[in-house]
């Protein structure tokens, strides 16, 4: 099932797309695809780093190991 996506861009963004399209000799759709690919890769990297941090924050010690050296 395919759904339409409505995309709205600011006027300055559209102007930048046109300008860079002319300067770089690239199609606007190509530039948008490249930008989104970089965005997705960046976000995926951030998620992987967060998951790694979350895993490292967890302890795998059992109750006795955790409390063994604690003086009360």
Image (tube, rainbow, N blue to C red):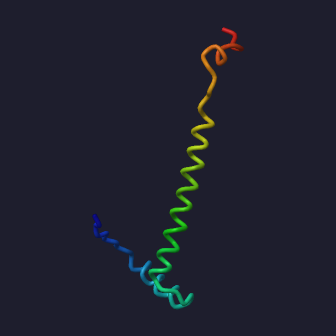
Q: Residue furthest top?
A: 72
Give the image location of residue 32, x and y in percent.
47, 76
9 with respect to 41 (left or right): left
Residue lying at 61% horizontally and 19% vertically, measured from the top left: 62
The quadrant of the rendering that contains the N terminus is bottom left
The quadrant of the rendering that contains the C terminus is top right
Please tell me in which quadrant of the rendered image residue 66 appears. Answer: top right
Q: Is residue 8 above or below residue 41?
A: below
2 with respect to 45 (left or right): left
Residue lying at 34% horizontally and 72% vertically, measured from the top left: 7
Of the pair 19 and 60, the residue shown nearer to us:
60
Q: Is residue 55 above or below residue 70?
A: below
Q: Is residue 32 above or below residue 66?
A: below
Please tell me in which quadrant of the rendered image residue 52 appears. Answer: top right
Q: Is residue 51 above or below residue 71?
A: below
Of the pair 54 and 16, the residue shown nearer to us:
54
Give the image location of residue 4, x and y in percent.
29, 70
User: How many numbered marks does the figure carry?
Assistant: 0
Q: Residue furthest right?
A: 69
Give the image location of residue 51, x and y in percent.
56, 44
Give the image location of residue 68, x and y in percent.
69, 13
Residue lying at 64% horizontally and 13% vertically, measured from the top left: 64
Residue lying at 62% horizontally and 27% vertically, measured from the top left: 60
């Amino acid at each position: 099932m395919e759904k339409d996506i409505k995309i709205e861009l600011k006027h300055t963004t559209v102007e930048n797309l046109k300008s860079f399209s002319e300067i770089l000799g690239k199609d606007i759709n190509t530039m948008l695809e490249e930008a989104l690919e970089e965005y997705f890769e960046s976000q995926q990297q951030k998620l992987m780093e967060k998951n790694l941090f979350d895993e490292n924050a967890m302890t795998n010690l059992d109750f006795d190991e955790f409390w063994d050296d604690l003086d009360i």
